[in-house]
Amino acid sequence: MKPISLYEFGSSEQVVRQIQQPFVDLFRGQSPVRDVGCGRGIFLELLAKADIDAVGVDQSEEAVSACKAKGFSVDCEDGRAYLNRNVGRFGGIFCSHVIEHMGYQDAMTFLQLCYGALRPSGVLLLVTPNPEDLTIISEIFWLDPSHIRPYPLLLLKSMLDAIGFHVIRESQFLGSWRLVAKRRLPGYLFRRILLGRHFGRPNTLVLAKKNGCSN
């Protein structure tokens, strides 16, 4: 049986790079950064270009091979096990399109481990599919058979608050107008007007900060 690639239905590296480029500034002054679920290493590449010290972890051999081919330091293991061994080590943790692969209790455990692995005043950036967007919840989310459940913004904020994080930024976004082909732009704008917040914002972002006092 031919295996389905992790990236068969995903965006191209160029598109992901456009989406993730603005996130780099959120990690300035937060080295070292850990990219949990680093995938093809696109954000590791962006951090390296910004001279921000970062390493990745991913349990997929396909992802780790892609990262190592680009020269990045990446560990092949479950991110939760890694975080559990590195308490108070990181200034920042980046976690893009990972939490939706976990059930609720596992996700809470994961966020708790992130909190523990951060230094005081460290930041956690979560990016996940936005289930309020009809194109996401009706099809795109379910193209990945390893997705377990979506996490709405309100739920994510509540989970982070319960653990002790302070949410300092939140958004539901497209990424860039350049991601919409010119010939599709009129239809895109029409659907945005018709469906409002339920179309054209496929991503949810939450930036949370650990308190500044040592536990």
Image (tube, rainbow, N blue to C red):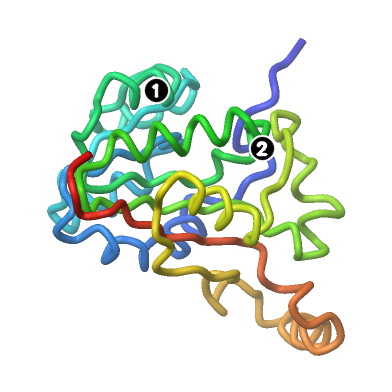
The quarter of the picture where the C terminus appears is: top left
Q: Is residue 93 left or right of residue 60?
A: left
Q: Residue furthest top?
A: 1
Report the front residue among 170 and 211: 211
The residue where tag 1 is placed is 65
Q: Quadrant of residue 209?
A: bottom left
Considering only vertical position in the picture, is 7 above or below 86?
below
Q: Residues within 10 Å of mark 2 (few under 14, many from 20)?
A: few
Q: Amino acid at mark 2?
A: Glu
Report the front residue among 140 and 69: 140
Q: Position of residue 30 (x, y in %)?
A: 18, 53
Q: Is residue 210 left or right of residue 80?
A: left
Q: Residue at x 81, y 54 (%)?
A: 137
Q: Number of labelled discs?
A: 2
Q: Residue at x 14, y 58 (%)?
A: 29
Q: Is residue 147 left or right of residue 112?
A: right
On residue 8, the disc is 2
On residue 93, the disc is none
Q: Residue at x 46, y 38 (%)?
A: 111
Q: Residues within 10 Å of mark 1 (few under 14, many from 20)?
A: some
Q: Residue at x 31, y 51 (%)?
A: 210
Q: Secondary structure at mark 2?
A: loop
Q: Amino acid at mark 1?
A: Ser
| C-alpha gap between disc 2 and disc 1 | 16 Å
Q: Secondary structure at mark 1?
A: helix
Q: Position of residue 2 (x, y in %)?
A: 73, 15
Q: Position of residue 191 (x, y in %)?
A: 83, 82
Considering only vertical position in the picture, is 116 above or below 186?
above
Q: Earlier in the sequence, mark 2 or mark 1?
A: 2
The quarter of the picture where the N terminus appears is: top right
Q: Quadrant of residue 182?
A: bottom right
Report the front residue among 87 and 27: 87
